[in-house]
Image (spheres, rainbow, N blue to C red):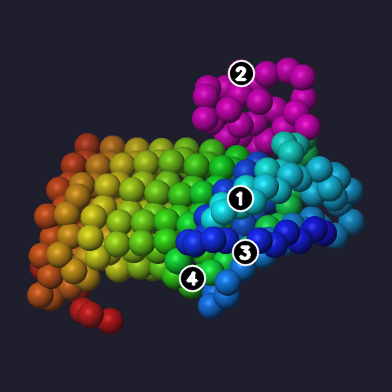
Amino acid sequence: MRTFTHVPDSQAALHLTLDIGNITVYAEDRPDVEITLAPENTDDQVAADRIARTTFDAVADRCVIRVPELPRHGRRAAVGSNVVMQSGGTIIANGQVYASTDEGAISVVARVPVGADLAAWTVLADIETYGKMGMVAHHTVSGDLAVAQADVVRVQGTSGDVDVDRAAQADVVTVTGDVEVRQLTKNASVSTVSGDVNVNSVADTAGSVVTMSGDIRLTTMAGARTEITTRTVSGRVRRPIAASAS
């Protein structure tokens, strides 16, 4: 286990690179940033070695954590770019064959000031945030994202669900994965191939939702107006007139 700390000059920004594991971020009433890395399995020596070699850089308001990648097998897999496959505990992502998923996974817990930004680059890692964040950006091959509250949510991924309780703006591009925004207050831009999309506007909103085969459900709280356009090839579109304020 390792813990890193930093006191930012202004609004904190955490940049994190982690291929496999999980990330939990708590936005709290505090002046400093505290990041703790631990193996998902306490006796995992591969993860412990990766944590020991992790680099941490902090300048002004920015903290940068880089976790070394898991060892990869020498051969390339015959799969397309940005494709994830798992067989017998082996991960194939972006055409590369990774070591067994039973080893090397790291759990990251970050405690940051309210309003902090998060940018994460992952291969196979889920992210959860609690409290009010500024911007949450997740670039992933396969990983779920769950956000309690943020000004802006941005996701670029191949597979994984996106679950947002409240956000002013949501920009999501994914191939397979459901997207839900329960309280949207400004703009949404969502594009999926086969995932379902559910967006509830609680203020005047605008934007677009595009799917190939996923269903789209847009609701608007009484008194609000939405100008979100929709397009789908084989999915269904539902737009109830109003949703309750609860």
Q: Are marks 4 and 2 in contact (CB under 8 Å)?
A: no
Disc 1 packing (10 Å; few <14; some 14–19; many ≥20): few
Q: Which residue is mark 2?
A: 78
Q: CA distance from mark 4 to mark 1?
A: 19 Å
Residue depth check, mark 4 versus mark 3: number of the one nearer the observer: 3
Q: Amino acid at mark 4?
A: Val
In the rendered image, residue 216, in percent from the top left (x then y), is placed at: 25, 52
Name the residue nearer the viewer: 52 or 146: 52
Q: CA distance from mark 2 to mark 1?
A: 41 Å
For marks 3 and 2, the one nearer the N-term is: 3
The quarter of the image holding the C terminus is bottom left
The amino acid marked with disc number 1 is: Val
Amino acid type, residue under disc 2 in the picture:
Ala
Q: Is residue 175 visible?
A: yes
**Mark 3, residues whose alpha carbon is within 10 Å: few (<14), some, or many (≥20)?**
some
The residue tagged 4 is 114
Q: Residue at x 47, y 38 (%)?
A: 158
Q: Which residue is labeled 1 in the image? A: 59
Q: Secondary structure at mark 4?
A: loop
- For marks 2 and 1, the one nearer the N-term is 1
Please state the horizontal and vertical placement of residue 167, each as a whole percent of the image: 34, 63
Identify the mark nearer the N-term, 4 or 3.
Answer: 3
Looking at the picture, which amino acid does disc 3 mark?
Val
Quadrant of res 198: bottom left
Q: Bin the neighbour count of mark 4 within 10 Å (Cα to Cα): few under 14, some 14-19, many 20 and up.
A: some
> Which residue carries the number 3 mark?
7
Mark 4 or mark 1, earlier in chain: 1
Report the magenta residues as a range. 71-98
